[in-house]
Amino acid sequence: MNHKRTYYLYMVSIFPLLFIFGTFYFFVHKSLIAFIGFSFSFFIMYVGFNLLGAIFLFKPIENLWKDTQEYSKIELLENTTLSQTKKKAINRIKNLPILSSLWIFTIGFIYVSLTVTLMVSSPSLIQADTLTGEKLSLNLVLTFFPSLLFVHAIIPALIGYFLVNDFTLEVRETVHENFNITLPARHRKIGLTLAILFGLLGLYPSLMIIIDLMSLSNSPNSYTQFMKLNPIETILVDCCIVFISMALLIFLIKRSFTKPIDRLLGKMNQVREGDYTTQAAILSDDEIGIFAGEFNRMVKGLEEREFIRNTFGKYMTHDVANVILKNKINLEGEMRICTILVTDIAGFTSISEKLSPVDNVRMLNEYFSVLVKIIQENKGVVNKFIGDSIFALFNVPLNDPDHAMNAINAAREIRNMTTKHKFGNNYELSTRIGINTGMVLAGNIGSKERMEYTVIGDDVNIAARLEQLNKELKTYILIGENTYSLIKDKIECAFIKNVQLKGKENSIKVYTIHH
C-alpha cells in the first residue's frame, strides 16, 4: 500500500533531519566519538521506536483498506459489518497528525531527559574530547535542557505534524474518492493554530537564547569547566539550527494551508465548467474544511437547480426557467393579463386506433416537438400536455407586451406546418387552435405533495371552448373578442358569429384569421 509506505517514510524522515543537526555540532565540537554516539542514539530512537509507533498509529487506516478492498462503493456504504472499521479509520485519519506529533515529541523528550540525566549524574559515560568529566551545575541544566528539548523534541514534533498533515490530505482525498467517505471538519480555528506556532517558533527560541545568555553571564566559568568549547559558538550553532528549522516549517505550514485551498479551487473550476456532480474532499479540520463542506452543500443545491432548470427547459425556454428559479415571479399567486393558446388534433381518436401504443407515442412526441419549438420561438410557454392537446401561455410568467400577436403568430405557424408535414408513419395531423386573452390567476396550484404552475379563470375556459368550437364551425383557428381587440390593427381577421358558450351568460364574438 503506497499510503502506508509514505507514512512510514515521513515518520522516519526525522532521523536524517537530526543527523544534519548533529553534523552542525560536529563541525564545532570536532568530536567524532560524540558524533557517532549521538547518531547511533538518534537512529535507535527516531527510526526504531518511531517506526514502531507509526505501525501502531496506521493500523486502523490499514484495516480500512484491507477490509474494503473486496467491496464496491455502494456495498461499502451498505455493509454494516464495516461500520466499526470505518469509524476507527475516520477517527484515526482526523487525529493522525497530532498523534504522530505527540509520539515524536515523547521520543525526543525521553531522549533529552536521558541525555541530561547522564550529563548530570555520570558525565564519564558520555565523555568525549570536548567534555571535561565535570558534573553539570543547576545553571547549565537550565541552559542545556531548553535547547536540547527544542532541537530534539519540539522541532521534530512540529515538522512531523505538518509532514503527516500533508500525508492525511492525500488519505482524505483517497477515502473520499474510493469509498465515498467525506470526513467532517471540526471547529479547529486557524487563529489558534497560528498562535501556538508563533509561541513555539517565535517566543520559545528567543526565550531559549535569553536563558543561555543569562546563564553564561551569571556563571561564566561553569560552562568552560564542563565543556572545552566556546559557549558563544554553541549558541551560534543553535541559532543556525533554529533558522533552518523555521525555514522548513514555514514551507510546510504554507503548504498545509494552500494545498486544501488549491484542491478546492480545482473543484470550483469543475463546477464553473458545468460539472454539478463534483464534491470536494474535506482536507482540513479548520475554517477551510468548513468552507469545503459548505461548498459541497452549495454544489448539491446547484445540481438540484440545474435538474429543475433542465426539467423546466423541456416545457419552456431556459430564460423562463431561469426567471422562475431566481424567484422573479410570484409563485404564490398573482393576477395577470394572459393570452391562452389551446391546441387539439382533429380526428385523433380514429388515427390512434390504427396505431400500436408505441407508434402512437412516437408520433405524438414528434408532433409535440415541432409545436413546442414554434410556441417557444414566439415567447410562449408550454404549460401542460393533455392527451393530444397543448396548453400554452403568453405573457405568463414573463412579461410580453406583444403576447396576443405572438400567440397569433404561433397559431399561424402551427397551422402552416401541420398542413405540409407528416408525422409518425406518414400521418397528416390537422391542428385546431383556440386563442383567448383575459385576466387570470397565475401561480402554483395543487397540494403540498404535488404542485403545478398554471393559470385559472373564465378566459382560460373560453380558450379551451373556442378550440372545441372549431369542429362545429369547420375552422382551424378561432380567437376571442378580447384577443381580437389587441391585434385587429396588426392582422386581418374575419368575424364568424356571436357564440353562446356553455356556462356563459353573455355571448361572445368569435373571429378567425387568414393564414
Image (cartoon, rainbow, N blue to C red):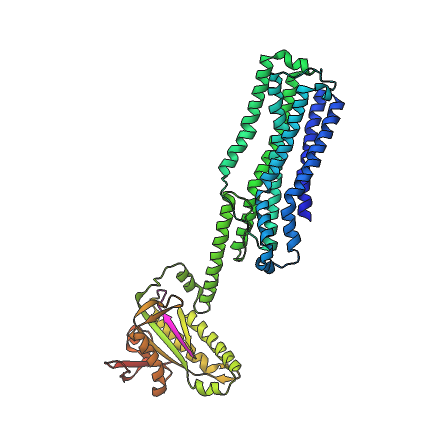
Corner quadrant of residue 259: top right
Nearest to the observer: residue 35 or residue 241: 35
Q: Look at the picture and state if 305 lies above or below 236.
A: below
Q: Is residue 25 visible?
A: yes
Query: Which of the pair 145/155 is nearer the observer?
Result: 145
Q: Residue at x 52, y 82 (%)?
A: 359
Q: Position of residue 40 (x, y in %)?
A: 74, 30
Look at the picture and state if 306 lies above or below 268.
below
> Extreme top residue here?
221
484 to 157, vertically: above or below: below
Q: Which residues are magenta?
A: 388-399
Is any part of residue 488 visible from this angle?
no
Q: Position of residue 455 (x, y in %)?
A: 34, 70
Q: Is residue 406 magenta?
A: no
Residue at point 74% right, 18% down?
A: 129
Residue 512 drawn above or below residue 274: below
Left or right: residue 466 versus residue 268 is left
